[in-house]
Image (spheres, rainbow, N blue to C red):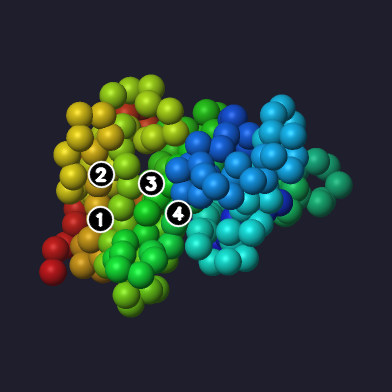
Amino acid sequence: MARRSGTLVADDVARLPGACATCLHWERVVDADAIEAVERSNGGVGEAAEQVKRRWWLESLSAGTVAGVVARAPRAGNGNGSDNGSGDGPGAAVAGYVTYRLPSDGVDALTVLALHVDTGCRGAGLGRALVHQVARETLRRPRVRAVEALAARVSGTPCLVPLEFWLACGFVVVHEHPLTPRVRLDARVLAGWRTEVEEAVELAWDRLRGAVRPEPAPKPALTLRRR
């Protein structure tokens, strides 16, 4: 995903797809007191929601408590040679993103907060490619043993990805709940993914660029080599 994705920075907040640029759901879950304090200082409603979100992310990214990955939407060339269609550049639209909370003391997993793919970019495997980016971050951190997330067992649950998606990515349910079970992908499983991950990521971007027609149905989960 080189040159097509990058680390989320505060300026990306205004370009997040869908309603994500002004949604404060996960920010409240993670740091409700700080969000309320910022809202009071900004007036709290309407356009201020985007300002609140950006300020919180600016401070949290600087503190190293959260992180994220954004995928840039491929764009057609504009005729002046300034764009190669790869989705590069600071002004490129965000096709999808994933944010996650870094482990604190006594916690052994990265926790996915939000994962969203723009409606026009779905069906190409971009969501799975973003999960793989988080998996790579896990493998870089010797004290981190897994990736975890809350899943939606019922369709339409706000700000949560359906359970079926996580299961297709190789996650397993570790805490049952009738609406929002917790899922986990162990680093020992991730270690066996390397070749499959690279192939899946490249295929996702080929489809997103239109080089390969998107499949009508999701692919099954990758074959995992357990060690």
Q: Nearer the viewer, residue 14 or 30?
A: 30
* Residue matched to label 3: 128
Quickly name the residue at label 2.
182
| Residues packed near mark 4 inside 10 Å, few (<14), some (14 to 19) or many (20 plus) | many
- Residue wearing tag 1: 185
Which of the 4 image quadrants contains residue 45? top right
Looking at the rendering, in which quadrant would you find the C terminus? bottom left
Q: What amino acid does circle 1 point to?
A: Leu
Say which label, 1 or 4, has the lower sequence index: 4
Task: Measure the C-alpha gap from mark 3 to mark 4.
Answer: 15 Å
Is 137 above or below relative to 82?
Answer: below
Residue 94, image x and y in percent?
Answer: 62, 43
Q: Nearer the viewer, mark 3 or mark 4?
A: 4
User: In the image, 186: left or right of 91?
Assistant: left
* Amino acid type, callout 3: Arg
Residue at the outermost left position: 227
Q: Is 67 above or below relative to 127? A: below
Cα separation, mark 3 vs mark 1, equals 13 Å
Q: Provide the residue designation for mark 4.
A: 100
Q: Who is closer to the viewer here, 25 or 170? A: 25
Q: CA distance from mark 2 to mark 3?
A: 18 Å
Pair 1/2: label in front: 2
- Amino acid on which disc 4 is placed: Tyr
For the point 58% across and 59% down, the residue is 60
Sequence-first tag of 3 and 1: 3
